[in-house]
Image (cartoon, rainbow, N blue to C red):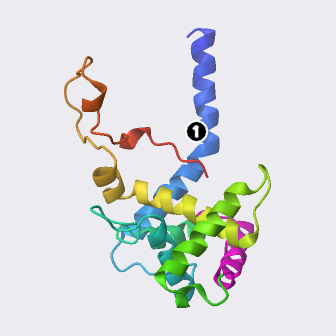
């Protein structure tokens, strides 16, 4: 084994040691959220309904299943139950309480247009926050929920197979085809990169 090979192997081991437990927790949370009859373990029923309503605004049902159809609210609950620290759990619940009051009355009492407008406004606010700072709690809730919704949806069966391209057993190599024929306008499921 030469020096370059040794360094490459050691870097892979280091990354695996650091990222491995986190990835396993994500996959465990996803697997737990897909079991029939699983109930929320971290969120109370009102919080769970609110998270589901926000996830549905972010990825609604269209010609493909939406976030709620893919089990995203339960995935978010399982992530906070199994993978997040007590500080992160507290931050999320505190931000959720601020979000619930941000519309003047409880979020679930707003009509559909008001809900979408509030989520859009807070999302824009979160994006406008200076880099490296935490946005206001209500906007922070929207961003945390967005990241978890996207992760949960694109780890789900409908997200991977109906929204992204998916080839369970890739076929022959076609190296010289027009770009418009490569992928039917969809990204490959194995090429997505999620950052939390």
Which residue: 50% across, 83% down? 49
Which residue: 52% across, 73% down? 116
In the image as oriented, which residue stretches furthest toward the top? 2
Q: Position of residue 31 (x, y in %)?
A: 41, 63
Q: Position of residue 35 (x, y in %)?
A: 36, 71
User: Along the line of sight, which residue is nearer the eye, 149 or 89?
Assistant: 149
Which residue: 68% across, 80% down? 102
Is 99 left or right of 177, judged from the image as shown?
Answer: right
- Taking 67 as reference, is 169 above or below it? above
Residue 152 visible to the viewer: yes
- Taking 24 as reference, is 38 above or below it? below
Is 50 left or right of 188, judged from the image as shown?
Answer: right
User: Along the line of sight, which residue is nearer the eye, 5 or 48?
Assistant: 48
- Quarter holding residue 129: bottom right
Viewport quadrant of the N terminus? top right
Q: Residues within 10 Å of mark 1 (few under 14, many from 20)?
A: few
Residues shaded magenta: 83-102
- Taking 22 as reference, is 167 above or below it? above
User: Along the line of sight, which residue is nearer the eye, 34 or 140?
Assistant: 140
In the image as oriented, which residue stretches furthest toward the left? 172
Q: Secondary structure at mark 1?
A: helix
> Which residue position is annotated with label 1?
16
Q: How many marks?
A: 1
Residue 28 visible to the viewer: no
Magenta highlight: main SS: helix
Q: Position of residue 100 (x, y in %)?
A: 64, 83
Q: Position of residue 124 (x, y in %)?
A: 65, 61
Which residue: 60% across, 32% down? 13
Is 102 left or right of 22, judged from the image as shown?
Answer: right
Quick check: is 98 in the magenta stretch? yes
Quick check: is 85 in the magenta stretch? yes
User: Along the line of sight, which residue is nearer the eye, 92 or 66?
Assistant: 66
């Amino acid at each position: 084994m030469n020096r370059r090979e040794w360094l490459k192997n050691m870097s892979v081991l280091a990354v695996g040691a650091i990222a491995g437990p986190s990835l396993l927790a994500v996959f465990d949370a996803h697997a737990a959220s897909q079991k029939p009859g699983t109930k929320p373990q971290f969120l109370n029923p009102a919080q769970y309904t609110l998270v589901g309503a926000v996830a549905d605004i972010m990825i609604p049902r269209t010609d493909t299943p939406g976030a709620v159809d893919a089990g995203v609210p339960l995935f978010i609950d399982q992530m906070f139950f199994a993978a997040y620290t007590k500080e992160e759990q507290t931050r999320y619940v505190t931000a959720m309480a601020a979000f619930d009051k941000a519309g003047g009355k409880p979020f679930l009492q707003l009509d559909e247009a008001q809900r979408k407008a509030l989520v859009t406004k807070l999302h824009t606010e979160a994006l406008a926050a200076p880099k490296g700072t935490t946005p206001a709690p209500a906007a922070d809730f929207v961003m945390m929920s967005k990241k978890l919704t996207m992760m949960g949806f694109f780890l789900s069966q409908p997200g991977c197979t109906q929204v992204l391209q998916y080839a369970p057993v890739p076929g022959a190599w076609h190296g010289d085809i027009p770009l418009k024929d490569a992928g039917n306008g969809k990204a490959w499921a194995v090429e997505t990169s999620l950052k939390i």
